Amino acid sequence: MRVDKLLANSGYGSRKEVKSLLKSKQVTLNGVTVKDGSTHLNPDTDNLEVNNKKVNYEKYIYLMMNKPPGYLSATKDARDKTIIDLLNEEAKVYQPFPVGRLDKDTEGLLLLTNDGQLAHDLTSPKKNVKKKYAATIDGEVLDEHVEQFRAGIVLKDGYQAKPAELEIIHADKTSEIIVTITEGKFHQVKRMFEAIDQKVLYLKRLKMGELELDKSLELGSYRPLTEQEKAYCLSIKR
């Protein structure tokens, strides 16, 4: 890998800013000052330092976000704001993307990473990774609906969803529920309730596998995964 690319990807600024660091002799490679950004190095074996401080390069980034409504789960869009707009420049240099999608008006747990294999495995139907949501429903959710979800509800387009867990917290003209699914079809939770002629008024993802939304994260904020959370994610890749 090139020295300038590694420094830029490690949060030391834009290519222009990194070039300035190199020109001012602030960068050393294995103890030798390096001014040419095109110099190649092995991140696993070579020692790169900026102002005598070792650069700890990480190939992948793993972030937990509490997604706010009004943002698309995408990396870019011509019209709407995306969750990438909420990241600082240091995080953006890793070019992370959302793992799975939350609708524009849906809140809650969203994992962002540049680890493509992990993203594939976490969203693969074969892995049966559970996604847990809290929702407010326009209509009374009944015990019979719990049974329908458990059996695998048939959507209005004829698709039979995989069995899902539906827990009724409060049922009246509007109901508060918890639903857990193992799929991630387009608008899945909303379509499941449409199949029983009810409408989702509010939806928030609480959990994805063993990753649970950090209750201290305000809407729109994010943090790196803890070592324990990261270990869980890496276990999914095996």
Image (cartoon, rainbow, N blue to C red):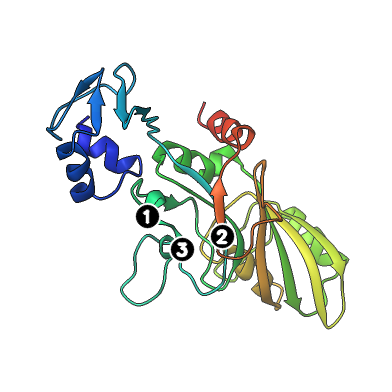
Q: Is residue 96 above or below residue 67?
A: above
The mark nearer the N terminus, 2 or 3, is 3
Between 98 and 19, the residue placed more toward the observer is 19
Where's residue 125, x and y in %?
54, 44
Of tags 3 and 1, the one toward the viewer is 1
Q: Residue at 50% across / 59% down in the picture?
A: 101
Residue 141 relative to residue 14: left or right: right
When asked about the image quadrant of residue 81, the answer is bottom left
Residue 12 disc label: none
Query: Do residues under tags 2 and 3 come within 8 Å of each other at their CB atoms?
Result: yes
CB atoms of marks 3 and 1 within 8 Å: no
* Up/down of 227 relative to 203, above or below: above
Q: CA distance from mark 2 to mark 3?
A: 8 Å
Residue 230 percent across, percent down from the top left: 57, 35
Q: Secondary structure at mark 1?
A: helix
Q: Are marks 1 and 2 in contact (CB under 8 Å)?
A: no
Relative to residue 42, is residue 158 drawn left or right? Answer: right
- Hey, what amino acid is under mark 1? Glu
Q: Nearer the viewer, residue 12 or 238?
A: 12
Residue at (87% x, 74% y) in the render: 171
Q: As rendered, which of 56 and 50 lies closer to the eye?
A: 50
Q: Residue at x 27, y 35 (%)?
A: 6
- According to the picture, the residue beneath numbered tag 2 turns out to be 221
> What kind of residue is marked 3?
Leu
* Residue 99: image location, x then y, percent: 48, 50
Q: Please name the residue that numbered disc 3 is placed on.
A: 86
Mark 2: few/some/many CA within 10 Å (<14, 14-19, 20+): some
Q: Counting residues from the N terminus, which is met first, the one under dot 1 or under dot 2?
A: 1
What whole-number distance in Å separates the C-alpha atoms at marks 1 and 2? 14 Å
Residue kind at label 2, given as amino acid type: Ser
Q: Quadrant of residue 23?
A: top left
Residue 89 marker = 1
